[in-house]
Image: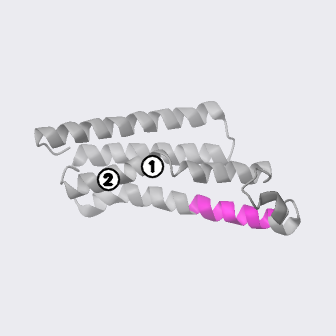
Amino acid sequence: MTLQAILSPLFVEVVLTFALMLLMGALRQGDYRSGAVKPQDIALREPKWPARTAQVAHSFSNQFELPVLFYVLTILALVTKQAGLLFVVLAWIFVACRLGQAYVHVTSNIVRLRGAFYIVGAVVLMAMWVIFIVGIYAGRTI
């Protein structure tokens, strides 16, 4: 697999994270300017942001949970030359689930749908790790 093919899903996940950060920043700035929050309300990370802003902030925070394991795995698979076609396909499925989860989280926030995206992505990531570990010990490329 090419370097671009292996890293493209990771880059999309990074872009998603930055997009959520920018949206969160814009909402927080608007809340601050409108007076919806005051500095003393948020100085110690108290949960006093309006619901919409908190919703986007939580989606942003979620990008530092499961995706961290995805980043590490991608780097390890690249360095050990274990990233083949199966790895790239599964990586795109994982990232598609992250995109779906983030979209639901910042729009309708239907917990059941959001959870479905999370579960599928988590199972795919677990499978990627299992395949990677087995591949390392068996000397195969995934």
Give x and y (percent) for residue 88.
30, 49
Q: Image quadrant of residue 12? A: bottom left
* 26 in magenta: yes
Q: Which mark is residue 109?
A: none
**Residue on which disc 1 sits:** 67
Depicted 110 relative to depicted 37: above or below: above
Q: CA distance from mark 2 to mark 1?
A: 10 Å
Left or right, 19 with respect to 110, comes to left
Q: What residue sits 78% from the left and 48% below the top? A: 51
Please tell me which residue is depicted at 56% across the width and 43% down the height of the picture. Answer: 101
Q: Regarding mark 2 in the picture, which secondary structure is present there?
A: helix
User: Is 130 located above or below residue 103 in the figure?
Assistant: above
- Mark toward the start of the polypeptide (2 vs 1): 1
Q: Which residues are magenta?
A: 19-31
What is the residue that sits farthest to the front in this orientation? Answer: 44
- Residue 130 image position (x, y, % from top left): 28, 35
Side (left or right) of 135 relative to 62: left
Examine the residues drawn in magenta and state their main secondary structure: helix
**Quadrant placement of the N terminus:** bottom left
